[in-house]
Image (cartoon, coloured by chain):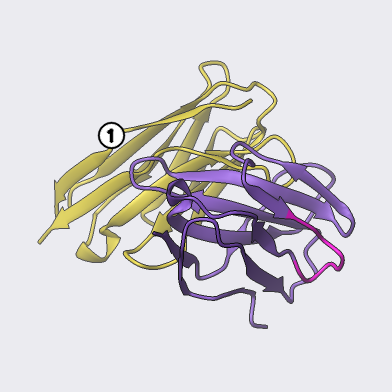
Chain colours: A purple, B yellow
Amino acid sequence: NAGVTQTPKFQVLKTGQSMTLQCAQDMNHEYMSWYRQDPGMGLRLIHYSVGAGITDQGEVPNGYNVSRSTTEDFPLRLLSAAPSQTSVYFCASSYSIGGGGTEAFFGQGTRLTVV
Amino acid sequence: GENVEQHPSTLSVQEGDSAVIKCTYSDSASNYFPWYKQELGKRPQLIIDIRSNVGEKKDQRIAVTLNKTAKHFSLHITETQPEDSAVYFCAAAATGNQFYFGTGTSLTVIP
């Protein structure tokens, strides 16, 4: 099992550009989510999905879009990059036990810089 | 929504001493409390977790305690070693994978 795979590992964007961060998991997990990590602020939830075709907003969703067409993939789209979106992004997946939380497995992260 | 506070933000201990990190949460619906360790440049990895129907859980040198009434939970690391040096995050979740993380504690174990 590869676990959770994110691409790219590093990315530099110019203000206003768009891009998609890819996330794939091979553990057949129902739940997938995206977090951003900024110094001194921990990890903050951007968007999450409880299964294919179902997505919802987290704490900091503005400027980001997601879709979940398959169980395996959960891409994060930046619509028009802004310097405030400079951060490290983590994708995570976990399985369902009837609504209770379970261990989240994280990808290796994407370091994004917007200039 | 949930609000998780974590203290201290930095912690230095001598090798062999104990380290304690404390977190509080606000949402009484939260029922799952994991702790993650993140080494520099790496992804967060689960080290221990506890559910709301349990008051304490131990795994070798690591233990977590939960006080549901007071809405706080703590991580205890005994006999610390240099390889314990990392950033530790607490989190709370009510459902699925909607985790709310604390702001992290940078632990340094001095040899």
Depth check, front residue: A32 or B106: A32
Label 1: how many Cα within 10 Å (few below 14, some 14–19, many 20+): some
Q: Is residue B54 visible?
A: yes
Q: Is residue A38 left or right of residue A46?
A: left
Depth check, front residue: B59 or A103: A103
The picture places residue A110, in percent across and down from the top left corner, at: 49, 67
The quadrant in which the N terminus of chain B is found is top right
Outermost residue on the top side: it is B69
Residue A43 within the segment the image draws in magenta: no
The picture places residue A49, in percent across and down from the top left corner, at: 78, 52
The picture places residue B36, in percent across and down from the top left corner, at: 46, 53
Q: Is residue B61 left or right of residue B100?
A: left
Q: Which residues are magenta?
A: A66-73
Q: Is residue B18 left or right of residue A43?
A: left
Chain letter for mark 1, please: B
Residue at the spot 45% in from the left edge and 58% down from the top edge: A88
Depth check, front residue: B43 or B11: B43
Q: Is residue B40 above or below residue B26?
A: below
Magenta stretch, main secondary structure, is loop
Amino acid at pointer 1? Pro
The picture places residue A61, in percent across and down from the top left corner, at: 64, 42
Residue at the spot 56% in from the left edge and 62% down from the top edge: A17
Q: Is residue B59 visible?
A: no
Q: Which residue is mark 1?
A: B8
The quadrant in which the C terminus of chain B is found is bottom left
Residue at the spot 38% in from the left edge and 49% down from the top edge: B88
Q: Is residue A5 above or below residue A80?
A: below
Secondary element under disc 1, as helix, strand or loop, is loop
Residue at the spot 52% in from the left edge and 31% down from the top edge: B66
